[in-house]
Image (spheres, grey):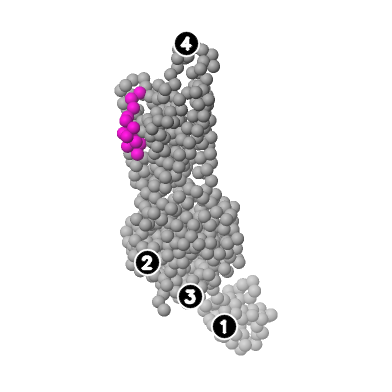
Amino acid sequence: MGDLGQTIEFTGLTKSFGGFTAVNDLSFSVRPGRVTGFLGPNGAGKTTSLRALLGLVNPTSGTATFDGIRYRDLASPLTTVGAALEAASFHPGRTARHHLEIYARAAKLPITRARESLALVGLDGFADKRVGGYSLGMRQRLGLAYALLGDPGVLVLDEPVNGLDPEGIKWIRELLRSLAAEGRTVLISSHLLSEVQQSVDDIVIISKGEIVHQGTLADLDTGDQLRVHVDSPDRAALGAALEASGFQIEMSRSGFIVHDVEPGAVGHAAFVAGVELSALQRKTSGLEDRFLSIVGGGAS
Amino acid sequence: MSTLIAATRAEFAKVFTTRIWWILLIILGGYVALLSGGLGLLFGATSQGMLGASEGVEGMPTTGLATMIYSTATSIGYVFPLLLGALATTGEFRHQTLTPSFLATPKRGIVLSAKAIALFLIGAGFGVVAIACSVGAGSAALAGFDIDTALDSSDTWALIGRSVLAMAIWSILGVGLGSVIPNQVATIVVVLAFTQFVEPILRSVGALADWIGTVTQWLPGAASDALVGASFYGAMGASGAQLDWWAGGLVLLGIALVVTVLGWLATWSRDVT
């Protein structure tokens, strides 16, 4: 079975506003069947890149395409690509159903798609309420309903997790995973890796308008430092044993952190010294730290 | 072509899914009905000397009175389709709905054309309601004083048709103006200041000397009155030279299209951030 989604291709995309270069020579591709996280701190150029991809911003140079076709040249844009950019692109006096019906008309989709996509995001009970009364989380869902209106093969979502409660975050994770599993292309941006790390397969990290890391989430993990947390009822004895083994150690509130060794080696050292252990655990996921050191050179 | 039709349908839906259109329409209808009915009563009573005779008034001619009263639908009411058109575009900027609009229809010229077409037709609808109110209230008042309502004259019905066309063109001018000045409050201020203050003064000045009148006849309100063929201002002697009705229509349409193209260049074709 072929993939539902198209491949997104950024090729040397550059965008300057006056003298300020928001995005500089951005090149990467986003494949179908996977969820790709587009990460970077606020102001890194994520939104500008996505708006250029969607034809809302004219690139200074370079292109961004869907299987080689620019957004403006797509024969049927909403059935090819669904996008949700930031919150609040709604007239507050309009109901959610009317809001979606307008764009269903413009895109020559069946009017019934408005109700169907509201049901998909769990807003069917609020379809005929004016959007002005919606909470931030409901607006995010309405934005997502707009993205799903044409049942597109590609989804481009800017900060989709913002403003969602924990239940909503869990819901959107599962939705994105299932959309990717159907063979769709899913590109989501976020300024926090931790927000999306449970949903994404691939990541592209940008900082100050340029790509600083690109690969799978697992790639980022392998760069992680090996650290072991260990503790004993007799901390003094444990400390002496670890030092005697020549490990690089660090005191922590709940014992010691040992750097650059496997947990087994730490356990062996304690065993040889006859020290009883109360905790022995590999410290995982310094992912967010890795992310921050990549985007900010460790500054933040 | 079918994309333009789809986009036009969407523009109709945009107008009719918020409340402002019927609020403006009710005020327009009520305002015009009150004004034309009031003028009908006032002139009717005056013509019969009921308000007390004064020098020369008892002989006040009533020919042309009916069409002058009916034309309040446009000469006073035109600000409403103008505002409706302006709000249709400024609302897109204000509520950032250009983003979903341009995502659904990435060819932006089609969106702007569709908006102009939709608002032209809705403006025509405003024109029908306005002229119905002015003719209804005005002719009832005049009939009460046995003054000729001119409703059996084909000239009157031609004037009614041209009034509807004028209101439709004013809506396009609103669309263009809203694109040139995307700030909603600023646009409303400009519309009210120009239509209620600047242009009336300029046209009054234009009545003072022929050479000024040849300039002020090109103003949108003067062109609109020329298109309709009768005017409240004209009857008050506040305007000088006037274009032929067809020339007035072309001038008004030309102004509307030029302003819309300026809007395209100034804002519509720019980055949406």
Q: CA distance from mark 3 to mark 1?
A: 36 Å
Query: Mark 3 vs mark 1: which is more N-terminal?
Result: 3
Identify residue type, mark 4.
Glu
**Residue that carries the numbered disc 2 in the rendered image:** A66
Mark 2 — on which chain does it sit?
A: A
**Figure check: A167 above or below B76:** below
Q: CA distance from mark 4 to mark 2?
A: 81 Å
The residue under the point 61% across, 83% down is: A241
Query: Mark 2 vs mark 1: which is more N-terminal?
Result: 2
**Residue that carries the numbered disc 3 in the rendered image:** A181
**Residue that carries the numbered disc 1 in the rendered image:** A263
Residue A22, horizontal then vertical, whole percent: 39, 57
The residue under the point 47% across, 51% down is: B13
Residue A161, horizontal then vertical, whole percent: 54, 63
Tell if the residue under mark 4 belongs to the same chain as the one under mark 3: no
Residue A54, horizontal then vertical, whole percent: 40, 60
Mark 4 — on which chain does it sit?
A: B
**Figure check: A196 above or below B242:** below
Mark 3 — on which chain does it sit?
A: A
